[in-house]
Each structure stands twice: as C-alpha cells, then as structure tokens.
Image (cartoon, helix red, strand yellow):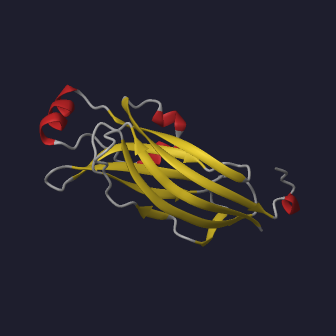
Amino acid sequence: MAEVHVIGQIKEAKEFPKQELFCKWYLQAGNHWRVIEGKKEGQTPVASSQFDSNRCCWSYPLDIHLATAGVQGWPKIYLEVYHLDWLGRAHLFGYGLITVPTSPGHHVLDCYTWRPLGNLRDRVFQYFLGGGPQIKYPDLIFSPEKRYRLSTEAMGVVSLEVDLILRNFNNYGVEY
C-alpha cells in the first residue's frame, strides 16, 4: 500500500477578534484510507498572547501515518476554532478546511476560517450573550455545493507547518 506521513504542527491563530482561543481538529479522508499510526483528531490547549493581540501560539504537534491503495479521497484537516469567554464558556469562532499537500517536503499552510452569519436577531444575541449560529451537520462543510449557499463571515487564519513523506506511490502508478 502507498503511505503518507504527515508530521508537523498546528502553529498559531492570527487575526481573530479576541484572544483565549483553542482549536479542535479532525482528519477527514476517503473510504480507501486508513490510519496506521497517530490520532485522527485532537484539541490544542487554550492560548492567548500578552504581547501580540493578533496572535495565539499553540505549536500543537501532528504526527499521522496513513495508508491507501489510491489517491481518491485525499486527506483534509478540518478545524473548529473556539473562544473562551470570561465565564469559561466556549463559543465557536470559526470553521476551516485545508487539504493535506500532495507533494513531499516542508509546507507552510494557512487555513482561512469562517462562521455562519445568521440573521439580525442572531447577531444581537451573539453580541450580548456570546455564542452564535453553528452548523448542525458538519458534513455540510465537506460539500462545496452546499457550503456556498451559506451566509458566512470571515474570521481569522490558522497556520500549520507540515512535513510530508510519501512512500510506495510509484508502485501504484502515481508520480510526484
């Protein structure tokens, strides 16, 4: 079987409107992919910066070893960024989806996040009480046709650094 090693880190969050952020991540891959070693999901610690109000550094490690018989359903990393308010409540700040690169080597990736906008009533509640609209079915994020129907607003950027090792792809007729 062909193998993909993803080694790196979820480095930081930039340009979010508030501090005290954490990130939940999930690996999403096609049916022909399986995880040999490593975790398919995780959560960073809560981070904030006293010196730079636009940046939260996580440096959360990623180490995933995957195997596949074909390239269909290439892996993606799905992110949810949350803000911790002064009462300790977690509020969703954004969703993001980024495709794992298809070429070996070192890659610096920026995942742009967004969240549902909601109507005027939702925004007033969000301003005074926190929270906000969330997606009921997360599978909607993986379908571009359905995702573009949503009314959204841009949030911040999550930076990832990954090193990719591809193995035995030549045996399956895939050149890189």
Q: Residue furthest top?
A: 120
When asked about the image quadrant of residue 164, the answer is bottom right
Q: Looking at the image, which residue is at 57% across and 51% down?
A: 161
Residue 148's spot in the image, x, y percent?
47, 31
Q: Residue furthest front?
A: 51
The answer to which of 112 and 174 lies nearer the viewer is 112
**Taking 83 as reference, is 67 left or right?**
right
Q: Looking at the image, which residue is at 31% across and 57% down?
A: 46
Q: Looking at the image, which residue is at 17% across and 29% down?
A: 121
Residue 74's spot in the image, x, y percent?
66, 52
Q: Looking at the image, which residue is at 52% across and 65% down?
A: 40
Q: Quadrant of the N terminus?
A: bottom right
Residue 90's spot in the image, x, y percent?
24, 53
Residue 2's spot in the image, x, y percent?
77, 64
The answer to which of 1 and 25 lies nearer the viewer is 25
When asked about the image quadrant of residue 93, the answer is top left
Q: Residue furthest bottom?
A: 37
Labels in figure, total: 0
**Taking 149 as reference, is 144 left or right?**
right
